[in-house]
Each structure stands twice: as C-alpha cells, then as structure tokens.
Amino acid sequence: MAASEKTAVLGLSRWKGTDKPRRADFVADNDALEEKVGGHLNDEAAHLNAERAARLDTPMDVRTYTGNGAAQRALLFSFTPRMAFVFAVGKGMSVSCDGYTKHYAAVATPEQNSGGLSLNRIQAMVTQDASAPGAGGSMFALNESGVTYVMAALR
C-alpha cells in the first residue's frame, strides 16, 4: 500500500506504521525532490534580487578627485552608499601643522560620521575648512587645493 499521507509542500510520502512502502513511492519522492529542490538550487534569480546582485557585481565605487579648495564639495554616486571613506594620497590621516592638526581622512555612514565627510542619499559631501584654527585646534582638509584624494563608497 502506498503512503497513507503526503507532506503538504513537496507531496512526499508520510508513512504510518500500518503502511507498506513500495519502491515506486521512493522513486516518486526522489523525483519530487530532484524537481523542486534541484530546480530551486539552479534558479539564480530565486536567490538574488537586482539590488543584491548589483552589490555583488560592484560592491563599491572607488574614485579619485583633486582638491579645488572649495569649502564643500559633493560627489555623486549611482546608488545610496552604506558607508564611505576618503583619504589624501601621500598624506597621513592626521598631520600636525604649526600647533594644530589637519585631518586628511574621514569615514561616514548615513547615520554618523567622523567629521569632514557626510552622506545624504546618493551624495557624499567633503569639507575643507577655510582657515587654520588656533593652537591645539583641528581642521578638515578633504578638498585641499592640488591634493589628490581617494573616495570609496560601499553599497
């Protein structure tokens, strides 16, 4: 006798103690598993939506820019970054200069930032303080004229 009951989703045999399994039952169950589970495993679209696929294909956008001295500068992306960081090429993250500190690197997420870099949807905004602070102070130098910077934004 075939199985008295079948499972709800895959329709596999669910035998009771009084049932007598037949080879045909096992073959049918294996065919059902092969079709449904095997088909699912081979269906890439079922596992990744377009947004997730884009994050895997291009997980970040890395670019360079040369500072122009403007107090603020916007860099636009084709996606909303989850995190971004920027640093000046050939400079330390923070450099002591005449009693104050210049910050040449920053990191930001949409919720918070280290200062000097902020994220708002598809835009990253870098800051260049216009004048040197007093002794012991600090300034953001993320758009200093003539300095090359690397910006990386993660999807």
Image (spheres, helix red, strand yellow):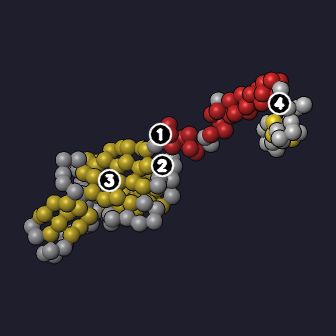
Residue tagged 2: 155
* 3 or 2: tag closer to the N-terminus: 3
Q: Is residue 20 visible?
A: yes
Spot occupied by residue 12 in the image (x, y as percentages of width and height): 79, 36
Residue tagged 1: 58
Spot occupied by residue 105 in the image (x, y as percentages of width and height): 27, 57
Q: Identity of the amino acid at label 4?
A: Pro
The CA distance from mark 2 to mark 1 is 8 Å
The CA distance from mark 3 to mark 4 is 66 Å
**Where is residue 32, by image quadrant?**
top right
Residue tagged 3: 86
* 2 or 1: tag closer to the N-terminus: 1
- Look at the picture and state if 119 lies above or below 14: below
3 vs 2, front mark: 2
Residue tagged 4: 21
Q: Counting other residues with Cα less than 10 Å from the Cα at mark 1, is it few (<14), some (14-19), or many (20 or more)? A: few
Q: Are marks 2 and 1 in contact (CB under 8 Å)?
A: yes
Q: Identity of the amino acid at label 1?
A: Thr
Spot occupied by residue 122 in the image (x, y as percentages of width and height): 49, 54
Residue toward you, 64 or 105: 105
Quadrant holding the N terminus: top right
**Where is residue 34, by image quadrant?**
top right
Q: Counting other residues with Cα less than 10 Å from the Cα at mark 3, is it few (<14), some (14-19), or many (20 or more)? A: many
- Look at the picture and state if 83 lies above or below 47: below
